[in-house]
Amino acid sequence: DAGVIQSPRHEVTEMGQEVTLRCKPISGHNSLFWYRQTMMRGLELLIYFNNNVPIDDSGMPEDRFSAKMPNASFSTLKIQPSEPRDSAVYFCASSLGGSLFGEQFFGPGTRLTVL
Amino acid sequence: GENVEQHPSTLSVQEGDSAVIKCTYSDSASNYFPWYKQELGKRPQLIIDIRSNVGEKKDQRIAVTLNKTAKHFSLHITETQPEDSAVYFCAATDREYGGSQGNLIFGKGTKLSVKP
């Protein structure tokens, strides 16, 4: 398996633009997590899905952020409109979940810069 | 929900010395405690984990101890090497939603520097 795949790896955009980050979890994993990492705030959980259903989105900063998981192999995190304070590394992670709850496997991350 | 505190935020040791990083958690229902290592510019990767039915676990130079009564767990690295330099994160499960649908709450991280 190729592991968790994220795209793009780097994104530079201007304030006000829409940004879409993509994630493909490891096949067979039924839990998917979106994190944001900054120097100031560390690694923050934004939202997580279990069997494609959003379980907890309390970490989503505001209405400008939205996430979807239309099927077991794809998820998106959208920011609209983007702001400079959204600049961060966004990680997607997946895990087996359920009774096998354990290791989360992280993707390589998307480094977002909003000018 | 779960709250995880991690100390110290930075740690500098000489090569060959031991390093200890400590974390406390608030949710007594938490039952899974992983440690992740993140090298500069890379993704976090699991290095060791422990479940609540075990007090200690060791993997070569790395060990983790868990004290459920005191709600704290620690990472021990012996015979440190320069390649151990990285940021280490502890985490604990947040069982707010019950059952097995838990997520991880991460500590703020410890930047470990091993000087040759």
Image (cartoon, coloured by chain):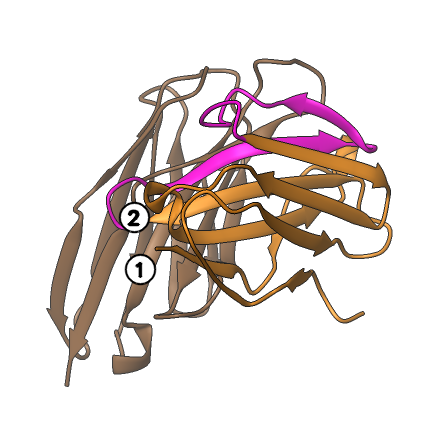
Q: Secondary structure at mark 2?
A: loop
Sequence order check, earlier mark of 1 and 2: 1
1 and 2 marks in contact (CB < 8 Å): yes
The brown-tinted chain is B
The orange-tinted chain is A
Left or right of residue A76: residue B20: left
> Do marks 1 and 2 share a chain?
yes
Query: Whole-percent x and y of residue A37?
Result: 39, 48
- Mark 2 — on which chain does it sit? B
Span of residues in magenta: A39-64
Q: Is residue B111 magenta?
A: no
Q: Amino acid at mark 2?
A: Gly
Q: Residue at 63% across / 49% down in the picture?
A: A20
Quarter of image, res A43 = top left
In the displayed image of the protein, which residue is found farthest to the bottom? B116
Left or right of residue B80: residue A16: right
Disc assigned to residue A108:
none
Q: Residue at 37% across / 50% down in the picture?
A: A87
Name the residue tied to disc 1: B87
Name the residue tied to disc 2: B109
- Mark 1 — on which chain does it sit? B
